[in-house]
Image (tube, rainbow, N blue to C red):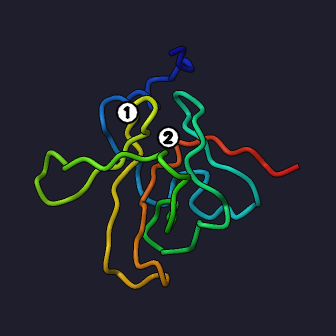
């Protein structure tokens, strides 16, 4: 599989499992209609209709494109990490039981892990 070239900051988050600072990502307060794809491999990950404002400082989604996301225990032993199912690129973490939406789930995703494709 061929991957997109990543800059130093993108590699830090996507490959080294880092985190961008809260409220700094370009998609935090971004609500256009379209599709969010993996920055590393361009696999479809999230639809804009599943994005919601959580106030946490990172883009939040309450659903994913089918079979697009893998959940793995985080190294901290408390959280669940989410990665791209196609390339294992780090996206963020998933949280349940917060009651932000009726689906009661929040994918907390680093903007730097995503690319956006606007609906035409």
Nearer to me, 49 or 25: 49
| The one of 97 and 113 positioned closer to us in this rendering | 97
Kindly identify which residue carries mark 1. 88
Label 2 neighbour load within 10 Å: few <14, some 14-19, many 20+: many
Nearer the observer: mark 1 or 2; the answer is 1
Q: How crowded is mark 1: few (under 14 residues within 10 Å), some or many (20 or more)?
A: some
Vertical relation: 58 (above or below) 87: below
Badge number at residue 70: none
> Distance of mark 1 from mark 2, alpha carbons?
11 Å
- The location of residue 120, given as percent across then percent down, is 89, 49
Q: Is residue 108 left or right of residue 114?
A: left
Residue 113 placed where, x, y %? 49, 40
Taking the spot 60% from the left edge, 32% from the top edge, the residue there is 42
Report the front residue among 26 and 80.
80
Sequence-wise, which precedes: disc 1 or disc 2?
1
Secondary structure beneath dot 2 equals helix
Which residue in the structure is indicated by mark 2? 113
Where in the figure is residue 17, as x and y percent of width and height? 30, 38
Residue, x 54% and y 14% (percent of image)?
2
Instruction: Please determine whether, in this image, residue 6 is positioned above or below residue 47.
Output: above
């Amino acid at each position: 599989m061929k991957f997109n070239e990543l800059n130093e900051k993108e590699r830090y988050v996507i490959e080294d499992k880092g985190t961008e600072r809260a409220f700094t990502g370009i998609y935090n307060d971004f609500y256009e209609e379209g599709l969010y794809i993996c920055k590393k491999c361009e696999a479809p990950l999230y639809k804009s209709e599943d994005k919601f404002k959580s106030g946490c400082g990172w883009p939040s989604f309450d659903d994913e494109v089918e079979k697009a996301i893998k959940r793995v225990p985080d190294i901290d032993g408390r959280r669940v990490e989410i990665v791209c199912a196609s390339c294992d690129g780090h996206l963020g973490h998933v949280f349940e039981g917060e009651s932000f939406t009726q689906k009661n789930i929040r994918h907390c995703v680093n903007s730097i892990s995503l690319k956006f494709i606007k609906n035409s």
